[in-house]
Image (tube, rainbow, N blue to C red):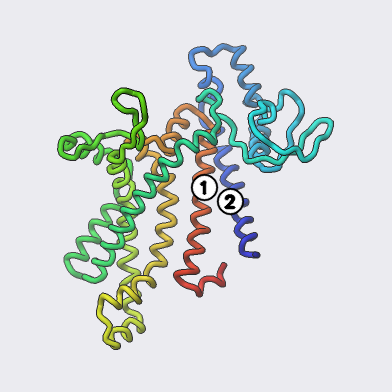
Amino acid sequence: MFWFWKKIGNILITLFGVVTIIFFLFNILPGDPAQMMLGQNENSEQLVVLKKKYGFDKPITTQYLYYLNDLSIISFHSKNSENISFLRDKKYNYLNILDTKNYFLVLKTPYLRDSYQKNGVSVIDIIKNTLPNTFVLAFASILIAVFLGLFLGIIAALNKNTWIDYSIQVISTLGMSIPSFFSAIIFAWLFGFVLSEFTGLNMTGSLYELDDYGEQMRLQLKNLILPSIVLGIRPIAVISQMMRNSLLKVLSKNYITTAYAKGLSKFNVIKNHALKNSLNPVVTALSGWFASMLAGSVFVEYIFGWNGLGKEIVDALNKLDVPVLIGSVLTISLIFIMINIFVDIIYTWLDPRTKNNF
């Protein structure tokens, strides 16, 4: 039970830090969100009304406190009609805990506000529509990385100091050094344009696209191939290197020598004794890479036209859509935290000795 509450406390502290940093970071970006919202229809009167509606006329610290209040599951809200909270619009369900003359105290789900640019569409709805596509892309990438990375790492370890081992290490180093956005441009141009007649792939495209008649959305799995490979290149390199080093370290242990002395074949020694004990550092890498893929997919999704959360972040950044930016980054941060907790649970299965550390 102590472990549970300790984790909850760490989550809340981490999220508070993330919210604070990204709120002030995105709200000091050059440009005026109110002007971006009005576009060519801008005039001084509308600008004043819009700034008052969204609280842009208030000090940044006041805006920050308002945002924390909206984000909290227990929050205070003024009965004043000028209050910028969700109660004014009556669009969200809440449970009234305390009702005084001037304030409400309510219990609610976290409110991420509405997009500045999409005609009042809630940030939660935007995340719901885009996050699944990013999950599909990240999951496909990590599958590719796991299978190829583990395979290459095992092959390199079993052929230590041979040309096979050196070749895999060179390829891994090259894969880690190339930025994902550069790989995305090369892959999109080469396989989606130059060799498109042979590959049948497109330079851009998402998981679902309108058919030729523009009537219904159709699943296009082929559009997943190039972005998932590009996003998986760097983790493949990391996993293969870590698997090689970890497996070599385990193979040098005394119990491996004992297993060979008992007459076990090399295949059985690796499968039953060495492989499982070599996975701890790899699991750590996987947890970090899967979470980082959700963030690192930003430019990959944008280049390939993949309609995920990463592409949404780039579009929101170009349009100064601050609620979408903050909500998206906060969602990725929460996922990262939950993945780390899941990895802690996996550790106790891989190595029961670590249970006391949690």
The location of residue 172, given as percent across then percent down, is 27, 57
Q: Could you tell which of marks 2 and 1 lies nearer the N-terminus?
A: 2
Position of 120 with respect to 238 (left or right) is right
Which residue is the extreme one toward the right?
101
Contact? badges 2 and 1 (CB < 8 Å) = yes
- Return the residue nearer the eye: 137 or 220: 220
Position of 1 with respect to 177 (left or right) is right
Which quadrant is home to the N terminus? bottom right
Q: Residue at x 79, y 33 (%)?
A: 103
Task: Identify which amino acid the numbered label 1 is placed on.
Answer: Ser
In the picture, residue 62 is in which quadrant?
Answer: top right
Q: From what the image shows, is residue 28 above or below residue 338? A: above
- Return the residue nearer the eye: 66 or 155: 155
Task: Identify which amino acid the numbered label 2 is placed on.
Answer: Thr
Which quadrant is home to the C terminus? bottom right
Position of 358 with respect to 194 (left or right) is right
Which residue is the extreme one toward the bottom?
261
| Element carrying mark 2 | helix
Q: From what the image shows, is residue 318 above or below residue 239? A: above
The location of residue 192, given as percent across then percent down, is 23, 36
Work out how far the residue at label 2 is from the one at label 1, CA to CA, in angstroms: 9 Å
- Determine crowd level at label 2: few under 14, some 14-19, many 20+ residues with C-alpha closer than 10 A: some
Q: Residue at x 56, y 22 (%)?
A: 34
Q: Residue at x 35, y 49 (%)?
A: 140
Q: Residue at x 21, y 70 (%)?
A: 159
Disc sitting over residue 14 in the figure:
2
| Element carrying mark 1 | helix
Residue beneath disc 1: 333
